[in-house]
Image (cartoon, coloured by chain):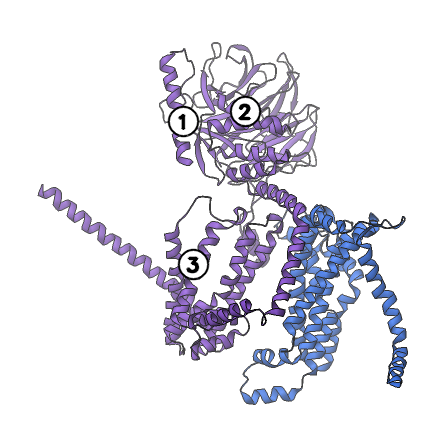
Amino acid sequence: MRYLNYLKKGIFPAIFFFALLIHPMKVNAVEAPYTTLTQDKDGHYVNTQTGYIPFAVYDKFGEKSLKKPSDLFLSTDGKMYLADTGNHRILICDRKGNLINSIEEGLMGPTGIYVDEDGTLYAADPKAKMILVYSKDGNLIRQYETPVSPLFAPNSRYAPSKLVANLSGSVYALSEGNENGILTFGSHGDFYGYFGANNTNITFKEILRRIFFTEEMKNAFKSNVPSAAINLDIDRNGLIYTVTQGADYGGVKKFNMAGKNILPEGYDDNLVTDIAVGDIENIFTITNNGYIYEYSREHELLFLFGGKDDGKNRTGLFIAPAAIDVDEEGNLYVLDSETGSITVFEQTEYAKTVHTALNLFQEGYYIESREPWEEVLRRNSLFDYANRGIGKAYYRLEQYADSMEAARLGGDKIGYSDAFWEIRNTWLQQNVVKIFFVLLALVFLKKLIGRIKDKAPVLRSITKGIRYISNKKLVKELAFLKYMPKNPADAYYGIKKEGKVSIRSSTIVYLLYFVIYVINKYYSGFLFKTVEDGYYEIGTDMLQVFGVFALCMISNHLICSIRDGEGSAKNIYCAFAYCLMPYIFLKPVVIVLSHFLTYNESFIIAFMNFLIVTAIAILVVVMIKEIQSYTYRETFTCIFLTIFTMLLILAAGFIIFALIKQVMDFIVSIVKEGYYRGK
Amino acid sequence: MKSKLKKINVAYYFLLPYLLLFVTFIILPIIAAIVLGFTNYNAVQKPEFVGFSNYINLLTQDDIFMQKVLPNTCIFALIVGPVGYALSFLLAWMLSQISRIPRTILALLIYSPSLTSGVAMAVVWKIIFAGDQMGYINYLLMELGIINDPILFLTDGKYLLVIMIIVSLWSSMGVGFLAILAGILNIDTQIYEAAAIDGLRNRFQEMFYITIPMMKPQMLFAAVMSVVNTFSTGAIGVQLSGSSPTPNYAGQLMVNHIEDYGFTRYEMGYASAVSLVLLIIIYSISKFARKIFRDD
């Protein structure tokens, strides 16, 4: 299937190219100089169709050009506002870059602008340490100077750099170097306080330090201050978004009215410089090195494109992008402060379909959203997000089987679990009475067989056959596994002194373990599987399983033989195999259950796995103690030494491996040298 | 022959007071529950016979039971049962090693939470886990800078079950604990001496080879008590969170579910069916416990 998809991907551009040859159109769109990526279900970046292509670049506005511009704003009345920081002014143009007006009054270096529905312009000027408000025709109405309020500490910095305003005229501003959060002002400029501050990340080391250090020692350390947000935006619902540089997780935040982040804290590029929110609440961010990310409302990556311009001035790449905004049609406007130019990107058909589907889905039109999702999949069947969307759509439509299939393709395990629960529930509803009667019949049958076992000749011969088989030596040795939980100490005595098991049976136990291990790894239920579908590496597994076993046994034997242990190598080999008893008996149950359980009942599997691990650990301890006739103290010393030896052997192995590789390289280069010289 | 029968009958008269009470307060209610489990009964109108449909509904229609109540009860019982049992054995064994007066005082101290649970819970645990910064745990965590805002421990579904488990473990040293303590103290010290002469080396060996085998009846009693207790606790989640049903059904156990249907919705028939299922679960697990501790 994957190969087919790759093939398809190759065919689409080819057809497109052909179409170009046949119909030479006037294309003013520039070919995209970058590849577009998206994230698949496992979080890997994969190629996808181009979502946005650059189609225009503006660098002259009337007669004026920009010097170190730092912000761009698209107002609802079709205008474009530019903060021309280096020339201390704000330019107002239309969307085609034709100059309409320019404002210079009171400005020393504006870096943030916002225009509300009425056309009132708000500008943040960190040089003038002021927020300036202009009327629609460009007259200065108000200025917000350093707040005088008990909420504003006298020594905090006030240098407003970015700002937004909401419908009621409240202003939310970021101040350079002020990590207390977003400053909020009422519509008349009175300071209301801070909002949505970033948190410090606290490390384990820091916690220990706080517990154990004295006041003096704590003061000697630099105080742990969160990094301040670098930019912000507001959506049509009045919710504020911020971006923070240098934060691997939670670099993009969306605040509710209470100042709590409501986005999941996914990975974010830590060079992010600006954020814009589109009409369907999709989030665009741009980074210092020119990458543009588009996320859905739930912070799932849709497109990633762009890149750093290496001096060749290619349209669509940037040197120092400063601001991004999005207009009503979904076109992206990106401002580059180094070149003083604006690049406009437009959506491709593909991106438009994705957005249509997303919008319908988010608004609750699940039936309607299915068709655009399928259209998206037709163009790019590797777009897992679409499968997840379809899965959720089917779930809402109560078509659970389809939902399950789509969720599996999209890697949405929670969606799969929910749909599976519904299917299983329906099945149970239909069959519960039957199941009850089957169980009843089985119990009755068992009683009946027990009653007439010695009378019916057929049953008697079966019993005889079973007895004959269970008297075979190998079967008896294997059946000794059952004796392990009853009295482990006694069982190990039997292994060591009474020859209850043989090397042959132990080897079979090891092989059994490996078979169960492989089945568990690749054929567990989808929800409890740790590897991707269609992914196999049996060779590595074999090396891992048997390698670890061999390493354990060899190290243990080495340690025990110098610490007065009684066990022989054969004893250790056999006893170690029989330690795996819990795994061999319980893991198959877990595997079978994993096909029938959903996340709702996952605690059963977690509990059984816990049981397996603890039981094996206890058996290993008892095994070493009994086989080597140690006391508990000696046993634990022996275990720690064994682990230490294992690490040593591994380290030595790596060194030898590296040395051999060196020698090989050396020989190869000598041969090459000789070969070339000889020629 | 006749006189023998008469003698037995006379013996029964002595049993009568107890038998009478037992039948009225235990046997009759159980029979009533079994019968009501097959009916629709709202405590006002006449019960209406519906066959197995209550049980079928419980397994197939009752999402809350299958998605919340059953998993909660299983997790709760799987942890509180065995861990509480192990804890009471360990504590009893440790107590048996010290001299008489401190042992009595400590035993009383350890036993008291299971007596006073209702009051103590409100006083102690609600303050410890309070959801504002005055709660001890929230205060500690905030002081250390691990969290910035207080966590609503008792009303947040994520934490409620864990807290219920902690509190139940704390109050799980009940009658079972006393029985084990009595059992350990009852063992003849001569056996230990004899074993020491035979080559027993340490206290752990004493515990495994003498203490546990010698007190199987008490162990069985304690196990059955702990099974019955863990499955029939229900009030704890409601008391801690202060709401019934518990927030998001996070701390809803089977007993709560029965109360919900029986005394909030007045669906007595359905509640009886659920309580019968609970009875079967408790009975079969007790039977399993008996199998483990059976004298072989």
In the rendered image, residue A96, in percent from the top left (x then y), is placed at 51, 12
**Disc 1 target residue:** A34
Which chain corresponds to the colour blue? B
Q: Element at badge 1?
A: loop
Q: Element at badge 2?
A: loop
Against A444, residue B211 (above or below) is: below
Disc 2 residue type? Answer: Thr
In the image, taking residue B54 as reference, residue B21 lies left or right, namely right
Disc 1 residue type? Answer: Tyr
Instruction: Look at the image and tell me whether residue A413 can be seen.
Output: yes
Quadrant where the N terminus of chain A sits is: top left
In the rendered image, residue A503, in percent from the top left (x then y), is placed at 38, 70
Instruction: Look at the image and tell me whether residue A340 can be seen.
Output: no
C-beta proximity under 8 Å, tags 2 and 1: no
Against B79, residue A231 (above or below) is: above
Disc 3 residue type? Answer: Phe
In the image, taking residue A462 as reference, residue B163 lies left or right, namely right
**Disc 2 target residue:** A111
Closest to the observer, A300 or A620: A620
Picture quarter containing residue A59? top left
**Disc 3 target residue:** A514
Picture residue at 32% right of the left edge, 59% below the top: A653
Badge 2 sits on which subunit?
A
Picture quarter containing residue A305? top left
